[in-house]
Amino acid sequence: MAAETTGRDRIVDVALRLFAQRGHDAVSVRDIAAEGKVSVGLIAHHFGSKEGLRREVDAHVIGLFDDLTDTAVEASPGPSGAIADSFASLLLGQLPPASPIPAYLRRLVLSGDPAGRALVERWHALSVALLDRMTAAGAARATADPEATAAFLMVNDLAMILMHEHIASAIGADPLGRDGAQRWAAAAVDAYTHGIFTPPEETP
Amino acid sequence: MAAETTGRDRIVDVALRLFAQRGHDAVSVRDIAAEGKVSVGLIAHHFGSKEGLRREVDAHVIGLFDDLTDTAVEASPGPSGAIADSFASLLLGQLPPASPIPAYLRRLVLSGDPAGRALVERWHALSVALLDRMTAAGAARATADPEATAAFLMVNDLAMILMHEHIASAIGADPLGRDGAQRWAAAAVDAYTHGIFTPPEETP
DNA sequence: GAGCATACTGAACGTTTGTTCAGTACAGTG
DNA sequence: CACTGTACTGAACAAACGTTCAGTATGCTC
């Protein structure tokens, strides 16, 4: 959409989109050069190598996520349940509908490289802190294993992003879309507050 | 472990392992041939092309999952809560610890190709049926949106497999391992039966 | 205006890729 | 024994890959 002036910006922009769409290995430097209307040499000039470009795109996405996280954390005034559950929604809600960021995030998290691991670790720390605050405020129950519970919440939240297409075909609405997000959040909040299973026999 | 007699079997076995480890694009037919101690020509002879081999491995994995699913479904005698939540555990518990299957499943589900989509759709149908049975038996509450609730359970369950490494580094125990599985299942069952969040103000 | 750094081009290079194919080994059939 | 089909080899090939590099254009500094 936005017309980048410099070739460098265009390369990063195109690479981000193509890497997200097809995966790192399935995109050649010539593809990127053609789409960005630059020569192959310019990519090497700015980033040294294809791997260097990848690192640059990774850093760009992670920086963007840091900004989104800050905004989302600031936007949460008190410890309310609805915020904690769809933290991912709160992040991605700030993005345009056709953004390649969710798809790139998916590759980043599941490629196993250190950048993705660091991102998830940060989110886990955030999830632990958030659950702690909610428990202190009485908005959440103190579970037997708070660390695992926080991880459970974070993983489920992240899974919504990673598998949003599968969810879309399963329930008929993309949870990254407007109506699908509401429906998914409603089901999640309901499950997290009232539970789903009924206890067999409580032996106190 | 098992010594395959025919070159064909060895090719599929090696391809499954390498595809799971490094991804489809990052593995060359020469890698597979070398590891399987066959010539490159034999791969073309049996499978036509690298893509043909991929389809064969996909079919092999999906067939294996069908068997695992049947076994898991049969193994569940009545509609008990503990079974529904960790359905994935029940599947993967049948596999050896170092099996490449979970990693391959991850690629299959998230690559976006029809084989993975079909697999997830089948699981969703299974999840819907299971939740239905549990609700009928009184083991589960009837939620406002059963379809979304079933999808929610399935996605969370699947996410444990997809992100087990991240979970391992977050809580210090791999949920695909023995002790980690118990800890994760405990946290999940606790969340699903007693909830995590406390309702703000019930207005009846 | 000379000098120099920076943005950028595109042909060329060497490597690796998936695929092809002529040929070997061998078991089963008549 | 001759014949046929199947498993299998490995050299060869064209295409695509990431990288290199000599060269052009432009704007800033002295």
Image: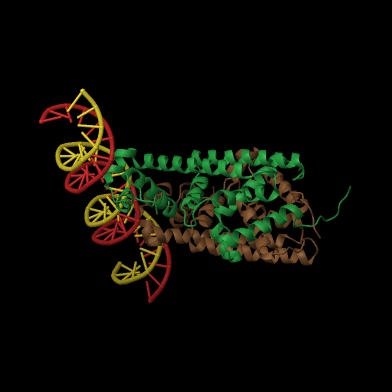
Chain colours: A brown, B green, C yellow, D red
Is residue A82 in view? yes
The residue that appears at 31% across and 45% down in the rendered structure is B7
Which image quarter is the C terminus of chain A in? bottom right
Residue A183 drawn above or below residue B97: above
Q: Who is closer to the viewer here, B118 or C24?
A: C24
Image spot of residue B201 (x, y percent): 86, 54
Seen from this angle, which residue lies furthest right?
B204
Residue D9 drawn above or below residue B182: above
Q: How many labels does the image show?
A: 0
Image spot of residue A90 (x, y percent): 67, 54
The residue that appears at 37% across and 57% down in the rendered structure is A42
* Quarter of the figure with residue B123: top right
Q: Who is closer to the viewer here, B146 or A188?
A: B146
Image spot of residue B174 (x, y percent): 56, 61
Is residue A63 in view? no
Left or right of B33? Residue A99 is right
* Quarter of the figure with residue B73: top right
* Quarter of the figure with residue C5: bottom left
The residue that appears at 73% across and 41% down in the rendered structure is B145
Q: Who is closer to the viewer here, B9 or B165?
A: B9
Image spot of residue C1 (x, y percent): 30, 67
Q: Who is closer to the viewer here, A95 or B170?
A: B170
